[in-house]
Image: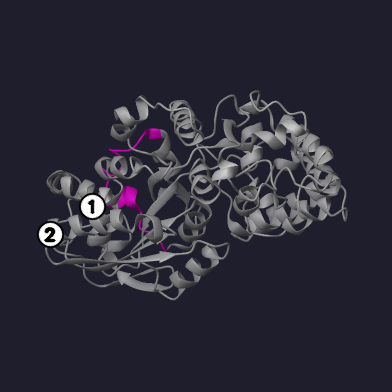
């Protein structure tokens, strides 16, 4: 397969890259016990010193829902790494990535059984960093930032238990953000597919038009606000947390209450399926059935529609996500690769994490014709593949649109712990159900968020 050929051609390059990016992982390992979270670890895994030790031993590598579509590619990457480092063995496991991912991963960490190298999102990285279970990569390899676009490297910073920001992740890939919509359904509602709205409230107004035209036969979007918090607030320029991250401030902005009022109105008017308010499902299935006008904002969603519903794909178009007050696109929080501070072979784990995320491997994966993802390394974004995008089909247009955005996109998104995010979401859901006013929901959400932040949650 193509992915196999790609990884074979990269073998020699990979070996050279490893020599250059091996973190200086040589010399003896620090002996003696220390702790990471509640687990005993080698003292070299924690503290202020650079990580040392031989790159040899067995590690576990965990991804999120990638094995089915990209097994050949990642098996090739693993094989290349093992060939470059005799005496290493990488076992690959793939998590389904459902809505319990963060809680399950934290439980694994507390049990001292978390994978050595793990694919995490921002909420999971936030929780694991605060609890002390992730390797401080910025300290353990001072050169780790080198390959990455500075703004993406900045997103790889999370707060430890003391509130200090540390680099516990490597930025891996980003999906970008765009509007995916069914042209036929929008036209029926009197919404011009060629003129995407420029603000979140403008998008909500289009949702309302869809609801009135559909009369319950189809919907505009999904109801669960977990998909929109804090992304919508960030795009609108609403400050969610204080500069030190220790208190919530979103209730101080009147637009937050307006946003909640809009969500409640849309839910009441039928813009969203009633049973989707607390569902963790994204729009994928209903959109592919022609029952939702707007699909996921992730560009890779277009690939899903193409594969699973050709008839709906023929009606699909993509457009610019509203710039709103931010004034530019949001790149979306990238997916990250972290190294467990509890790893028994941390030098191997860190070396593999850096190999996986280097420019050669990022570029190779992004060129796969069945994925719409974007790299986080400078060399990869300078590749002609991203500079010379052609094609008029939705899949090609999604890649072109986001590739153009990424040059100026904002990557400084708010990182909320799962507990704080859920506290906000639950109050918004109560307002959407008509059980609270928008103002009370926002006020209570901020109070509950502040209680959690004071507890360190």
Instruction: Give the spatial CA distance, label 1 vs label 2.
Output: 34 Å
Residue pushed farthest front?
311
Q: Secondary structure at mark 1?
A: helix
Q: Which mark is residue 61?
A: none
Which sits in the foreground, 50 or 13?
A: 13
Residue situated in front as seen by the camera: 270 or 339? 270
Q: Which residues are magenta?
A: 133-150
In the displayed structure image, the side of residue 194 where residue 187 appears, left or right: right
Comparing 158 with 371, the one in front is: 371
Residue hosting label 1: 4
Tell us which disc is closer to us: 1 or 2. Answer: 1
Q: Is residue 110 above or below residue 441?
A: below
Which residue is pictured at 70% across the width and 57% down the height? 423
Q: Residue at x 28, y 33 (%)?
A: 379
Residue 27, numbered label: 2
Q: Quadrant of residue 448?
A: bottom right
């Amino acid at each position: 397969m193509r992915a196999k050929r790609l990884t074979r051609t990269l073998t020699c390059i990979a070996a050279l890259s490893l020599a250059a990016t091996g973190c200086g992982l040589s010399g003896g390992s620090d002996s003696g016990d220390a702790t990471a979270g509640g687990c005993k670890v080698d003292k070299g895994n924690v503290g202020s010193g650079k990580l040392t030790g031989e790159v040899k031993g067995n590690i576990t590598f965990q991804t999120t829902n990638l094995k089915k579509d990209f097994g050949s590619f990642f098996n090739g990457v693993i094989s290349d790494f093992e060939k470059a480092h005799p005496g290493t063995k990488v076992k690959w496991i793939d998590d389904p990535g459902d809505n319990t991912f963060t809680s399950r991963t934290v439980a694994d960490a507390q049990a001292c059984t978390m994978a050595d190298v793990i694919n995490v999102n921002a909420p999971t990285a936030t929780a694991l960093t605060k609890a002390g279970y992730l390797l401080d990569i910025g300290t353990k390899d001072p050169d780790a930032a080198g390959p990455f676009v500075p703004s993406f490297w900045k997103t790889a910073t999370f707060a430890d238990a003391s509130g200090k920001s540390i680099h516990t992740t490597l930025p891996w890939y980003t999906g970008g953000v765009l509007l995916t919509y069914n042209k036929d359904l929008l036209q029926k509602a009197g919404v011009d597919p060629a003129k995407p709205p420029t603000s979140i409230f403008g998008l909500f107004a289009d949702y309302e038009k869809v609801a009135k035209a559909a009369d319950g036969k189809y919907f505009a979007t999904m109801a669960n606000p977990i998909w929109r918090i804090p992304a919508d607030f960030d795009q609108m320029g609403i400050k969610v947390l204080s500069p030190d991250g220790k208190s919530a401030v979103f209730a101080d902005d009147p637009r937050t209450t307006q946003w909640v009022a809009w969500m409640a109105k849309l839910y009441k008017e039928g813009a969203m399926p009633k049973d989707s308010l607390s569902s963790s499902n994204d729009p994928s299935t209903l959109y592919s059935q022609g029952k939702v006008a707007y699909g996921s904002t992730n560009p890779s969603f277009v690939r899903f529609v193409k594969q699973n519903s050709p008839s709906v794909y023929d009606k699909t178009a993509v457009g610019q996500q509203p710039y709103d007050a931010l004034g530019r696109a949001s790149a979306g929080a990238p997916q990250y690769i972290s190294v467990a501070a509890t790893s028994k072979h941390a030098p191997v784990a860190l070396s593999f994490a850096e190999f996986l995320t280097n420019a050669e491997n990022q570029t190779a994966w992004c060129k796969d014709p069945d994925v719409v993802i974007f790299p986080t390394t400078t060399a990869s974004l300078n590749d002609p593949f991203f500079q010379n995008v052609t094609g008029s089909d939705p899949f090609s247009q999604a890649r072109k649109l986001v590739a153009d955005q990424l040059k100026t996109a904002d990557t400084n998104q708010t990182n909320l712990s799962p507990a704080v995010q859920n506290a906000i979401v639950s109050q918004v859901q109560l307002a959407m159900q008509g059980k609270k006013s928008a103002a009370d929901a926002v006020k209570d959400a901020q109070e509950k968020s502040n209680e959690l932040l004071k507890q360190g949650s």
